[in-house]
Image (cartoon, rainbow, N blue to C red):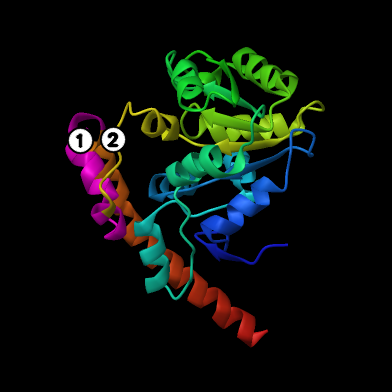
Amino acid sequence: MTANTILFDIRFDLLEPNQVLDWIGARDALSDFAYIVTPNVDHVLRLERAGAELHETYDQAALCLCDSQVLKRIAKLLGIRLTLVRGSDLVAALFSQVLQPRDRVCLIGGGEAHKAALAQLYPEIEVIQHIPPMGLQNKPDARTAATDFAARSGARIILLAVGSPQQELLAAEMARHPGSKGTALCIGASVDFIVGERRRAPPVFRRAGLEWAWRLGSEPRRLAHRYLVECPRIFPMAWRWRRAERKRRKIDRLR
């Protein structure tokens, strides 16, 4: 049982990256199915407006890890400690440190060239891929096909690269599939960084918590609205949550 804390009504597990790798490394292709989610600010804001189904996908995850330096710093201002586990770093470390020759990885989503690129980078690891159609969240048959493919894959690691919240919903659906085994990770665009399709922010940006600024400068048309309009809503949300928590604690003391 890992230590955890609650922020914005989300359970965050307090593991360092090396501990997460050890946890995954202790599992194999026959382990009971488990999945990992890595929420960032965008995920947290989406959850605030979401219904119960999406909240349950995070609640049911084996590990819920903070993937945002900004979120970690907001938590610190609220008196809450979070550990930072960047999803892109975690996936890269899986390939370089955890996966062994002849291990199988099942990639759900990603680009058509990703399977070949990963095979070239890691020739001793078997990579299989299923690319579902766009709009997966509203296509039950497509979700079933992806879930069945993963369950039949015999993979030690399943990488869900279909974007949020589709990947979290798909992970929860896989957990309900009687044939599911192994460990799934909701990874967003992590494979893009591994194969060099996108460039990660330089380390100085990552250490300063400014990876979002680097990405905004790299893809302004795609990310401007998210980072400059949507994401700043996290600050009034934090203020409301702190007020609600203080009120709850006051009521608890009076009982």
Residue at screen point 47% across, 44% down: 87
Part of the protein shown in magenta? 204-222
Assess disc 2: are there few (<14), some (14-19) or many (≥20) residues with their C-alpha within 10 Å of its C-alpha. few
Amino acid type, mark 2: Arg
Picture coordinates of residue 78 (x, y %)? 42, 72
Q: Which residue is mark 1?
A: 218
Q: Give the residue displayed 66% in from the left and 14% down from the top.
A: 145
Majority secondary structure in the magenta region = helix
Above/below status of 7 relative to 174: below
Task: List x then y, in percent, for residue 193.
Answer: 37, 34
Viewport quadrant of the C terminus: bottom right
Q: Confirm whether the magenta stretch covers residue 122.
A: no
Extreme-right residue of the structure? 178
SS at mark 1? helix
Q: Give the percent coordinates (x, y) of residue 192.
A: 38, 29
Label 2 residue SS: loop
Foreground pick, 178 / 22: 22
Which residue in the rendered view is the most extreme toward the bottom?
A: 254
Depth check: 70 or 234 in front? Answer: 70
Name the residue: 57% across, 61% down. 15
Q: Nearer the viewer, residue 101 or 240?
A: 101
**Res 41 visible:** yes
The label shown at residue 85 is: none
User: In the image, is residue 219 part of the stretch drawn in magenta?
Assistant: yes
Contact between marks 2 and 1 (CB within 8 A): the answer is yes
Q: Quadrant of residue 79?
A: bottom left
Give the amino acid type for the residue marked by disc 1 in the picture.
Answer: Ser
Residue holding disc 2:
199
**Where does residue 156 sit, x and y in percent of width and height?**
69, 32
* Cα separation between marks 2 and 1: 9 Å
